[in-house]
Image: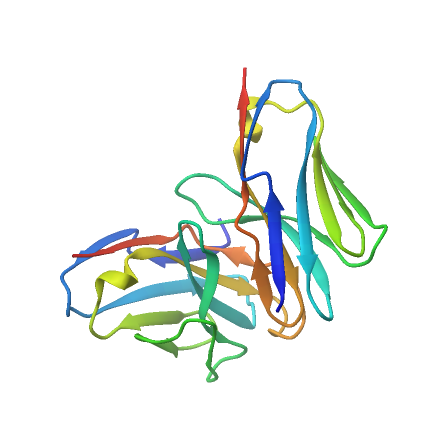
Amino acid sequence: NAGVTQTPKFQVLKTGQSMTLQCAQDMNHNSMYWYRQDPGMGLRLIYYSASEGTTDKGEVPNGYNVSRLNKREFSLRLESAAPSQTSVYFCASSEGTVQTVYGYTFGSGTRLTVV
Amino acid sequence: EDQVTQSPEALRLQEGESSSLNCSYTVSGLRGLFWYRQDPGKGPEFLFTLYSAGEEKEKERLKATLTKKESFLHITAPKPEDSATYLCVAGSGKLIFGQGTTLQVKP
């Protein structure tokens, strides 16, 4: 089925470890996004990419880096994981640019625990 | 400051008992108001986009409406499979997410 695929689905890290969350979409969307979802906080934008080769900071970028590898793939890297980064991470994509409001398609999420 | 507030936080209904979920927003330059459904352990699933006051959209037992300050998601004769968290999202060049209303429909 067409959509947004995230890997892994679950991950436990020790404080200070690094990891990369992978995201791929097969809908030929221009824009891709990384969000985190925490209880009582709603979804918060970490980074986004309006097109291949461009990335911009969102609301909560500290401690994260991203790479827009090509039009399909957008990865999120935690260089030195901290317990405050325990969260559920969602990747999303949309047809238009970030300044044009379209419905987003979300992946199923990565549940990350940092101990 | 742009803000989206949803109420109630949680709602329990009996199957067939109609109700409404409220979304109040204060957003400068609103370009679209979205509703999403999120099931436990899954990502949000797009339901509707509303662009202007007075607009209505329907899908099965759900109807979304929009005024200049609020949006409502009306659920008519809900079924247990409608149980989920419903997210209201305001778009103004960026997306501002509400915290959601968790709906439980009991048979």
Instruction: Determine which quarter of the picture holds residue A97.
Output: bottom right
Give the vertical position of B66 relative to B107 (above or below). Answer: below
Q: How many marks?
A: 0
What is the residue that sits farthest to the top in this orientation? B107
Q: At 60% from the left edge and 73% from the top edge, which residue is drawn?
A: A98
On the image, the x and y values in percent for residue B48 come to 68, 49
On the image, the x and y values in percent for residue A79 come to 23, 75
Q: At 39% from the left edge and 63% from the top edge, which residue is drawn?
A: A23
Look at the image and tell me in which quarter the C terminus of chain A lies: bottom left
What is the residue that sits farthest to the right in this orientation? B54
Give the vertical position of A23 relative to B12 (above or below). Answer: below
Position of B39 with respect to B55 (left or right) is left
On the image, the x and y values in percent for residue B50 come to 75, 54
Residue A74 in view of the camera: yes
What is the residue that sits farthest to the bottom in this orientation? A53
On the image, the x and y values in percent for residue A86 come to 28, 57
Instruction: Determine which quarter of the picture holds residue B105.
Output: top right
Residue A103 in view of the camera: no
Give the vertical position of B77 relative to A13 (above or below). Answer: above
Q: At 19% from the left edge and 70% from the top edge, which residue is drawn?
A: A18
Q: How is the image coloured?
A: rainbow
Q: At 63% from the left edge and 66% from the top edge, which residue is drawn?
A: B2
